[in-house]
Image: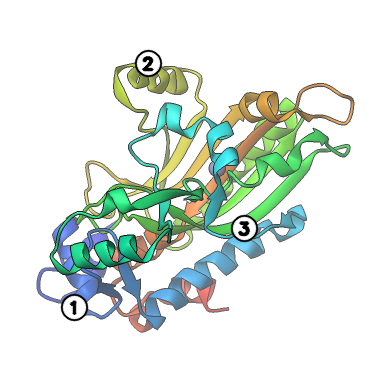
Amino acid sequence: MDSDSRLCNHPGCDTYDSRSLYDGLVAHGLIIPSGEPGVFGRNAVFEDVLERFAALVGRTAAADGAEKFTFPPTLARPVFERSGYMKSFPQLAMGVVSFCGCSPTEHARLNERIAAGQAYDDLLQPTGVVLMPAACYPVYPSLGGRLPAGGRLVDMTHWVFRHEPSDEPTRMQAFRVREFVRAGAPADVVAWRDTWLQRGLDLLRTLGLPAEAEVASDPFFGGAGRMLAANQREQKLKFEVVVPVISAESPTALCSFNYHQDYFSKSLDILQADGEPAHTACLGFGLERVAMALFRHHGFDPAQWPGAVRARLWT
Ligand code: ZN
């Protein structure tokens, strides 16, 4: 596909690179910088694209009859601790701190330090919550006990937070994920994952995006993490659907599929209807990334996008 012909003709918007995408999004008013890398506003046009893609995912999944859950972007610390996130990705977690409000003297000291541009972190304390590190984490504890026959399927859209400050526009500190979690018999869970792998490819390809599926691994921390990543690849527990957005050689993951086997079931006692341990899997679409891929491939003005793409989204 000659995707170059579809790129925007705004100066600097004609290559697969991080800078031109960021500058193009800003120049067209689609994102609004905040001064902190990876944290920016989105305008109405960006949000419209994002929401219409999310609606298309919803239409694709409609016949599956998923239960819909919504959790706030704050995850209770005990749920976070049980998830094992700190064992694997301590570098990405983001806690929430608060001033303890103990005394007027300390409050005065806090404001003096802020006014003087000095560090004041020692006057803040951890709270009972962390920012949501993965869209599906709050769901697993609610699945504990025996599942109904056929298992369960949950649909959610959550803000996700990662401590990865970066000027690369697709690597955000806060973004939304449309995610599904399937829990049930191992064969059912794998079949569901495989169905969605094909659906994910089809969904993105019908939007004119050159999507491919590949075996992937998570960014596990440290030396031991390399072994975990190798193991994850070897067992094909993680797949991604990727599309070139900021690089032709290293395409960006727009959708990721994780098969956890009995990882969550063991610690949370999630059982099949017959009492056997259940397996779980999840899949998530990075909604901002999909919107950015569409802007990259079809230009920064959705009114000018190919008719077939517009027809899929603006039905
Ligand atoms: Zn997940």
Secondary structure beneath disc 1?
Answer: helix
- Neighbor class of circle 1 (other Cα within 10 Å; few <14, some 14-19, many 20+) is some
- Residue situated in front as seen by the camera: 99 or 65: 99
Closer to us: mark 3 or mark 2?
3
Residue behind mark 1: 27
- Residue situated in front as seen by the camera: 192 or 271: 271
Q: Earlier in the sequence, mark 1 or mark 3?
A: 1
- Residue situated in front as seen by the camera: 307 or 123: 123
Measured along the vertical axis of the image, is residue 291 above or below residue 141? below
Q: Is residue 120 left or right of residue 209?
A: left
Residue at 30%, 55% (x, y): give it.
170
Quarter of the image for the C terminus: give it: bottom right
Measured along the vertical axis of the image, is residue 228 above or below residue 134? above
- Neighbor class of circle 2 (other Cα within 10 Å; few <14, some 14-19, many 20+) is few
Closer to us: mark 1 or mark 3?
3
Residue at 42%, 28% (x, y): give it.
88
Question: Which label sits on residue 227?
Answer: 2
Picture coordinates of residue 247 (x, y %)? Answer: 21, 49
Q: What's under tag 2, amino acid-wise?
A: Met
Q: Earlier in the sequence, mark 3 or mark 2?
A: 3
Residue behind mark 3: 71
